Image (cartoon, rainbow, N blue to C red):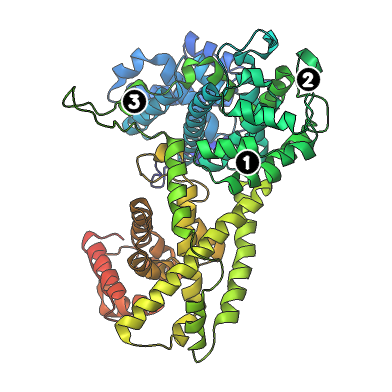
Amino acid sequence: MPPKPPRRPGAARSQRCSPDGGSGSAPPPRSPRLGVGEAGFVALCDALKVPGSVREKAWKTYEGLAAAEGAPAYDKKKKETWGVCIFIVAIDLDEVTFTFTELLKSISISVCTFFQFLKEVDVNMDTVSTKVDSTVSRLKKKYDVLLALYHKFERTCGLIYLEQPSSEISAELSSVLVLKNYWITFLLAKGKVLQMEDDLVISFQLLLCVLDYFIKLSPPAMLKEPYKSAVTAVTVNGSTRTPRRGQNRSTRTSKQVDTDTKVIEILCKEHDCNLDEVKNVYFTSFIPFLNSMGIVASNGLPEVEVLSKEYNELYLKNKDIDARLFLDHDETLQPDVIACSQLERTPRKNNPDEEINVILPQTPVRAAMNTIQQLIMILNSAADKPSDTLIAYFNNCTVNPKDSILKRVESLGHIFKKKFAEAVGQGCAEIGSQRYILGVRLYYRVMESMLKSEEQRLSVHNFSKLLNDNIFHTSLLACALEVVMSTYVRTASQSDGSSAETDLSFPWILNVFDLKAFDFYKVIESFIKVEPSLTRDMIKHLERCEHRIMESLAWQSPACMLLCAEEPLLGQPALESAGALIWLRASAGWEENSSHALKFQAVVLHAVSFGKP
């Protein structure tokens, strides 16, 4: 759910009152005092091992809800309401003794229904802190990504494996067992490799790595074409693979795995994935994961039970969603029925005799892959170094900016790669490098278009002042990288083009380059104007960044913070005064009558008229 304005400080006071900051490893919870809650509430708390401090506050929260307007609705859903109250308080007090899945199962409710019910509770009574909001947002994003990936996983496996393989295949290699082994291996790899588990693109690329690995280990008799031919060709060309029966299955060495790329090439082609990016994930993240598990170097894959035990430890540590339950189509993980019916709805023919191509709705994964392909197509002809045309512009400058530009690109690249790895996972550092290279290509491409446009407009050939401006280059590169990052960092809920926050979402790039929001804002309009190949989604994203800067980020600069501290109410005459506007314009470096300054002045005057920024 979206961020909220500052809440009442009740949650913070509750934290200070908590006698125990621990959770899973804490001593057995103390018994609640007599008279706390109905028998059903006490039984629910006992099942979830809820400590006394949480029980007491959760029951008071429930009583507050029951006394509020609309209380009869909560009486009909007592157990669900108790569960929501326990969840809210346990998060606020940092005393979570249960996983999110355990909570859902205890109150017999699905993820989607729980989130919707929590939203209703918050509307009727302001009980949800920003801390709970953040936890719910993380859980929802993780669920959305897992749901999209599992649906894609099921469909993909149906295209790879025969439903009824020949009788020569051991019963132990049934499709159910194969699916279970695949999925749990993927969940384990995702949990250990990725710090930011809501990254749909990297997660899907990792899933393709898992599929590639298992396909190579599968007997050809289990596989459909073209995977059967690819695996057979590997065997004929000399890679040894002994039949996998029971516990005597064996894998090839890591060297053999590394050199057989036919299967991964087919998978990437089928799913419109960039082969180089998937290979990068394979060698920098997936192979190290296999090595850490002792899989590549040893005989055979661990049994499903071993993998499941490893994943269970990870799941209990995170206290979130048990994604193994997707395999059982568990009711707690089923999506909202209404949303699904709308997703599956397709256009109908007006005339039964008329032949038309019905366009099926895109899945979140397919939408993400298509958007990435669009970006790559734009940058296919671009280079990650200045073109001859740019070099000519550099040579026309009074002070040639070439060396400083190249050094800046190199130094910012090191910073970007480091920050990306910190956010996503150290094993994904090279993925950050790949995305930075795409950003650099777009940066040089847009810079060249800008200079051509200004040359035609002003009949000027010497752009020494502009091209030697460090802030201009940093802002332009940041804008190019924001386009790249927004293209890749899609979540499963973004298939409709809406914005969704992740750890790498704007204004992440501003923090990476220590760039002021005003400076970034100044290049957005020109960036969109000179780059006609930007997709509609890319343009909309940059416009959202622009609006966010003017609505909030711009007011977080030290200058504005100082002014607002001196004049807390923006309706005060001081902010209306021309002096204040000139001062703010000067701090942004804009000419008095420039389009940026006039737009900013309009926004400020609009803010003043409503008494808020």
Residue 366 image point, x, y percent: 44, 37
Residue 432 position (above or below residue 386): above
Residue marked by disc 2: 249
Dot 1 falls on a residue whose secondary structure is loop
The answer to which image quadrant residue 33 occupies is top right
Left or right of 594 in this view: 257: right
Mark toward the start of the polypeptide (2 vs 1): 1
Residue 454 position (above or below residue 193): below
Mark toward the start of the polypeptide (3 vs 2): 2
Residue marked by disc 1: 194
User: Which of pointers 1 and 3 indicates the residue nearer the eye?
Assistant: 3
Residue 288 image point, x, y percent: 74, 40
The 10 Å Cα crowd at callout 2, few under 14, some 14 to 19, many 20 or more, is some
Q: Residue visible at 18% across and 23% down?
A: 353
**Residue reaching furthest front?**
236
Tell me which amino acid carries mark 1: Leu
Residue 468 visible? The answer is no
Dot 2 falls on a residue whose secondary structure is loop
Q: Residue visible at 53% across and 39% down?
A: 269
Task: Work out how far the residue at label 1 is from the one at label 3, CA to CA, in angstroms.
Answer: 31 Å
Tell me which amino acid carries mark 3: Glu
Left or right of 178 in this view: 351: left
Tell me which amino acid carries mark 2: Arg
User: Which of pointers 2 and 1 indicates the residue nearer the eye?
Assistant: 2
Give the camera-side residue of 146 and 321: 146
Residue 565 image point, x, y percent: 40, 66
Dot 3 falls on a residue whose secondary structure is helix
Q: Residue visible at 56% across and 59% down?
A: 436
Query: What number is the disc on residue 344?
Result: 3
Is there a contact, CB below 8 Å, between mark 1 and mark 3? no
